[in-house]
Amino acid sequence: MFGTIQLGWLQLKHQKLRLFAAIMGITFAVILIFVQLEFREALVVSAVRYHDAMQYDLAMVSPKTDFMVSSKQFPRSRLYQVQGFVGVESVTPVYMRLVSWRNPSDPSNARNILAIGFDPTDDGFEQLLRPEQMEAIKIPDTVIFDRLGRDEYGPVRSLLDSGESVKAEINDRRFTIDSMYQVG
């Protein structure tokens, strides 16, 4: 048995450049597989991030919805209809839409941003927002900003961390940013 290992090693080291090229090719393939696995993980994590932060067992989505960012509405009566089923404790409408966000420090810079709306008196958002934030968004024209939002939306994090009041335009309407949550 040991003689076959020595013979195999002799065959491998006979052409050192070829051995090196083969090892590099295998190494590159393994690295590529790990990169693809990380891309897949990032896609899954980013796709379910908000759903994990909201406490629900079942979500109803309009059949006309292509993907969550461009969700289509359906009649509110459907929610009340579902509430009549045995085992359904509560029903909460959640609104998700891309809106136009104007950078607070540079109002000429407008970007699309995902806005999520819900009734703060409903249950199921305790992991998303703290109790004082739930109270704050009961005030009209008050929003909570995601701490992990991209820098292209302006210096919202640094302004709020320094204690300054931050106002921004969303769909050409002025809003006050009260505080930040962290989902990404």
Image (cartoon, rainbow, N blue to C red):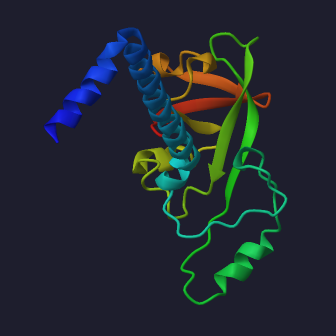
Q: In this view, does 139 lie to the left or right of 164?
A: right
Residue 81: image x %, image y %?
73, 81
Nearest the camera: 166 or 83?
83
Q: Which residue is at 42% across, 18% downward?
A: 24
Is residue 165 in view from this perspective?
yes
Q: Which residue is at 63% across, 54% downward?
A: 118
Residue 7: image x %, image y %?
25, 28
Q: In which quarter of the image is residue 90?
A: bottom right
Residue 94: image x %, image y %?
66, 57
Q: Which residue lies furthest to the bottom in this view?
A: 86
Quadrant assignment for the N terminus: top left
- The relative height of residue 163 versus residue 35 in the rendered view (above or below) is above
Number of numbered labels in the structure image: 0
Q: Which residue is at 66% across, 31% downward?
A: 175
Q: Is residue 124 left or right of residue 152?
A: left
Is residue 147 in view from this perspective?
no
Nearest the camera: 39 or 7?
7
Q: Is residue 20 left or right of residue 104?
A: left
Q: Which residue lies furthest to the left in this view?
A: 2
